[in-house]
Image: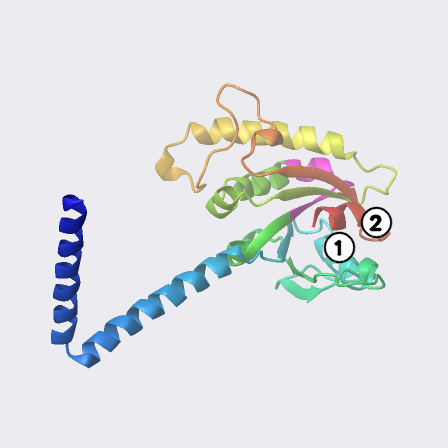
Amino acid sequence: MENLEDLKIMAEQWSNQGIEYLQKIPPFQLYAAIGLMLLTTILLISFRLVRRTKSNTVLLSGLTGSGKTVLFYQLRDGSSHQGTVTSMEPNEGTFVFHAESAKKGKIKPVHLVDVPGHSRLRPKLEEFLPQAAAIVFVVDALEFLPNCRAASEYLYDILTNANIVKKKIPVLLCCNKTDKLTAHTKEFIRKQMEKEIEKLRVSRSAVSTADVANDFSIGIEGEVFSFSHCCNKVTVAEASGLNGDTVQVQDFI
């Protein structure tokens, strides 16, 4: 009981000292301190809410001529817009997929960005990565072999990008134009690109880190590269922009 009484007396003393200290502080300083604490609390809460808000931005990337722009228009309004030229500026828009526009109920729109595939314009992809929730990397399944190396290098740069690795942004490897008789299958494309990326891993790991532009390495040491080794999920799908077959792309998004 004596210990309890001692603690009570000490608490009263501290309380009185605290009140006396606060009374000595000029009112405007006290109000300013309280205001600053409230503002800090509000900013912290707002920051956490913003971080929890899921982005709806999806990027369409890939080499020039892979069919990204046709897919963009097909998803937006159900038209292939045949006759469109190579995009020199990003096409972007926020909309409900055309295939879902007739459905009842609330459907969340998607902010879709068609990033130019020309090598000189690829840095534009970097501008959109901080907002990206997912990436659709489009490959021409009809003219795949001549472009396999270039497409694999571009995809390698994406998969080793700091934004993508840290945020574990999912990537869809979209094999476009698979409706054509001479088009390669998605399994063939997947295997060939894994082989090319394995070659890139070996060659670039032999280069001094000062000469490598990539932020992260990918794969498992001592094993042949597979997309399943990536920190983020990589899915392979088929599509046909001209025929309007975009179901697997929509399911991914």
Separation of disc 2 and disc 1 at Cα?
A: 9 Å
Q: Which residue is mark 1?
A: 71
Residue on which the image places disc 2: 245
Q: Position of residue 116 (x, y in %)?
A: 62, 57
Q: Where residue 163 sits in the image (x, y, percent)?
A: 49, 48
Q: Which residues are magenta?
A: 136-148
Q: Residue at x 11, y 75 (%)?
A: 24
Q: Amino acid at mark 1?
A: Leu
Residue placed furthest toward the top: 222
- Residue 138 covered by magenta stretch: yes
Quadrant that contains the N terminus:
top left
Camera-nearest residue between 220 and 183: 220
Q: Which quadrant of the figure has residue 197?
A: top right
Q: Position of residue 54 (x, y in %)?
A: 58, 56
Q: Secondary structure at mark 1?
A: helix
Q: Horizontal placement of 75 versus 9: left or right?
A: right
Amino acid type at mark 2: Asp
